[in-house]
Amino acid sequence: MPTNEIAGNETTAAKGTTGVAGLGDAAGTGHGTSVSLRALTRVFGVTRALDEMSLDIAPGELVALLGPSGCGKTTALRIVAGFEFADSGQVLIDGSDVSGVPAAKRDMGMVFQSYSLFPNMNALDNVAFGLRMRKIGAAARRKRAAELLEMVALAAQAGQYPHQLSGGQQQRVALARALAIEPRVLLLDEPLSALDAKVRLQLREQIRTLQQRLGTTTLFVTHDQEEALSMADRVGVMRSGKLEQVAAPAELYSRPATAFVAEFVGTMNRLPAELSADGKTATVLGITVPVHDGALAAGPADALVRPENLTVTPAEDGDGIVTGRTFLGAVTRVAVRLSGDTELAVDVPSTAALPMGPGTAVRVSLPPAPVLVAPRGA
Amino acid sequence: MAAVVTERTPAPAPAPAAAPRRRRPVPAWRWLIMLIAAVYFLLPLLAALRFAGIKAFGTVFTAAGFGSSLWLSVRLAAVTWLVTMVLMIPTTVYIHLRLPGLRRLLEGITILPIVIPPVVLIIGVLQVMPLGLRATVWMLPLEYVILAMPFAYRAIDAGLRAIDIKTLTEAAGSLGAGWLTTLWRVILPNLRTAVLSATILIVALVLGEFTMASLDLQQTFPVWIVLFDQFDAQMSVAASIFALLVTWLLLMLITVVATRQSRRTGGGEVTLFTVAPRETIGN
């Protein structure tokens, strides 16, 4: 799944030259804007929506904030946008503090979760609105709005009103509107969550391609891990107002820093483990493996292992029983129950899964690679 | 739309779907209710028409005080409308955006003018009215603003509920619009239907209000009708029917114009108390 990693930045320049004529200038202001969140704290009543959150976004980078609802990701985005204010901490744009600058003066393009087009204006006027606010002449702003609509492949819909557009089209117009002002930063607040799966997938790619072409620094908030992993240069996983880990998608998946990240991103098995006295190795499924960042005390713990990192083979004397199979194409996810009621998911090449019907006795084993451990049951 | 295709091809028989839809017959009891309502509403009008006679309609327009009192009522309606809008729109928008918790309270407050008798209202108003305004005709619109508040508030509130005002305001803000620009270019145009609903109610209210005008000793159109009744009852009834007709025409005009406007941008139909929410196509 997380294949595009940081592939983006090298190809950005090349793609930029093939962009729509006249948008070379558009990309201009987008380049080179860095964003820094410094120890942002925001308290609503008794909940700390943000707790000393810090994040640096490099120029032209797309960073996704991923986390369960209520983790503070939207609050962080709204503070950057200027719709909310932090109780303490700073937002730096290109190094200067914008904490006191109102939203209207921050030069940030935003696409909202709910449909936000102005119902009284057609698509073209919606896109041109920000330019009008910047006192750009009627002819120039119409020309530029038309270019942007073309960029999101909606040139034919320029004269239509929002209620005549589908949800996906509305969000594309909203994207064009946000980009029309040549924003220093693009802010995306779950822009795809109201759309159906197919449209979501198309728009995901479209946003990413545009963002790379224009090189606009982008902060993207989502609760959908697939979205975050497939679109972002880096993903920040949030929990209770704090960033648990910020890393490239592939790293986040293969080397999660905490048990929360490990289990929030992708599927994760918990296997009973016994930590050695020095905490540097653990005994899991009868073999001894090294442990990442051994910070836990000796004794019982849980080892976190991805389904694709386990192997399962039919064995008369194995202590596992197959309880179900899900065919996923090339691989089949086999559900196994170990003695002691541990439920596991193991990904097996579909051909190898054929003899493992429900009820088959199996043996589950683990390669001697380092594993992540977490306190038992936590 | 499919019908357009079949229209030009002569040979094929029209598809069953294109055939005119058979309406289900309206049950008899509905006709009965319609009939009772029609008798209840139309009989007094017919009686009044019969009483006034056709001749009265010819002379009513030249009757002493007809023109001036009608003109006064129209001006009062205009001023009442303006003051109400300037007060109620920003207030309601602000409550929706910043103090949504107070919406309930405001609903309660705005219903008060309906609950409190006009006489009590006037005495209250006289207590706080600046001396310079007390004897003038401009005291009336200030009283009417209070009377109109329940209707105006409800219409605007319904209009604001139909749009996602928070997101629209934030979107306008992120694009560089200040609050005044946002109000003027984004919120107001989307409240057009609601504002027109409120306008209908205000016009109808002011053109028909008698108690306050009469207690304030101002000869508005309704007051003139009652006074004139003492000299020429037939002509007074003719004037009433005329007023009814004018108000009705005005309301029809506003409704038609507003509905046409709002259809264009996907808004709801104009009705007196609510604005139907906008519909959005799915994905």
Image (spheres, rainbow, N blue to C red):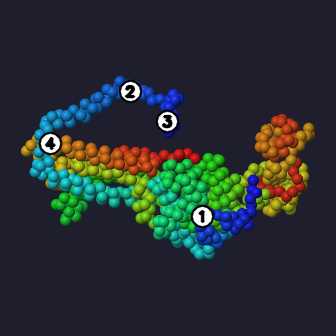
* SS at circle 3: helix
Q: Amino acid at mark 3?
A: Arg
**Residue name at image x 53 percent, y 53 percent:** A157
Q: Residue at x 43, y 64 (%)?
A: B181
Residue that numbered label 2 is attached to: B26
Q: Same subunit under labels 2 and 3?
A: yes
Residue A45 visible in image: yes
Quote the CA–CA distance across marks 1 and 4. Answer: 68 Å
Residue situated in front as seen by the camera: A202 or A76: A202
Residue B67: give its label: none
Residues at marks 4 and 2, common chain?
A: yes
Label 1 SS: strand
Residue that label 4 marks: B57
Above or below: residue B34 compared with residue B162: above
* Residue B116 seen by the camera: no
A182 left or right of A7?
Answer: left
Chain ID of residue with mark 1: A
| Rendered view: B143 above or below A216 | above
